[in-house]
Image (cartoon, rainbow, N blue to C red):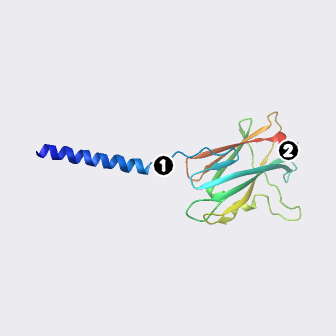
Amino acid sequence: MKQHKRWLYLLLAGGILLEVSACTQKEPAAPSAPDHIILEDYEIRYKGFTVMQDINENPALVINLDFTNNGKEATSYLWAVSEKAFRDGIGLEVATVFSDPDSYDTVTKAQLTEIVPGKTIEVKSAYILPDSDTETVEVEFSQNPGKKKGKLSIDLTEAW
């Protein structure tokens, strides 16, 4: 009799665990659009690019993004997201591009602005564009710290 009660308790406990597990499983995230990257606590929406000159008169790619903080604390884009750009598989150097010829403000200044959860801010990133036959720049984003990554392909022929 005691043996039957043990089995009954084990079966009930197992059934409860299965039910709890089924209730807590997350649905897989829907794939994001090519211009919308969802990281763990943040969202990045690609809004386009321009080609400008950096302070040394090199051509520079300036990427326009919307950054949304879905985390629990105020943060800045620069603190929250790691960003890398590649052309021909080679990492691009960060460019210094002034937003106004009469000031020393750079186009990337907004990356330092902290925003509270639920808010969105426009940010820009700038990279020196070396000569290349490849017309595509690949940009990788990852949350700091975090494992989730997102990628963006930019077709440079759209600028010409």
The residue lying toward the viewer, choosing from 54 and 19, is: 19
Q: How far across and how far down the image is residue 128, in percent?
A: 79, 46
Secondary structure under the numbered disc 1 in the rendered image: loop
Can residue 62 be seen at all in this image of the molecule?
no
Is the N terminus in the top left, top right, bottom left or bottom right quadrant? top left
Dot 1 surroundings within 10 Å: few (below 14), some, or many (20 or more)? few
Q: Which residue occupies the foreground of this view, 38 or 89?
A: 38
- x, y percent for residue 42: 61, 55
In the rendering, at what x and y percent does residue 142 appear? 61, 49
The vertical placement of 157 against 122, above or below, is above
Q: In the displayed structure, would residue 127 be above or below residue 103? A: above
Return the residue at label 2.
159
Which quadrant of the view contains residue 4?
Answer: top left
Find residue 93 and report its horizontal and vertical position in percent: 75, 46
Residue 127, numbered label: none
Give the CA distance from mark 2 to mark 1.
41 Å
Seen at 70% across and 52% down, the residue is: 45
Along the polypeptide, which appears first: circle 2 or circle 1?
1
Q: Residue drawn at (20%, 46%), measured in percent from left and top? A: 8
Is residue 148 at all visible to an observer of this figure? Answer: yes
> Which residue is painted at 83% across and 38% down in the image?
131
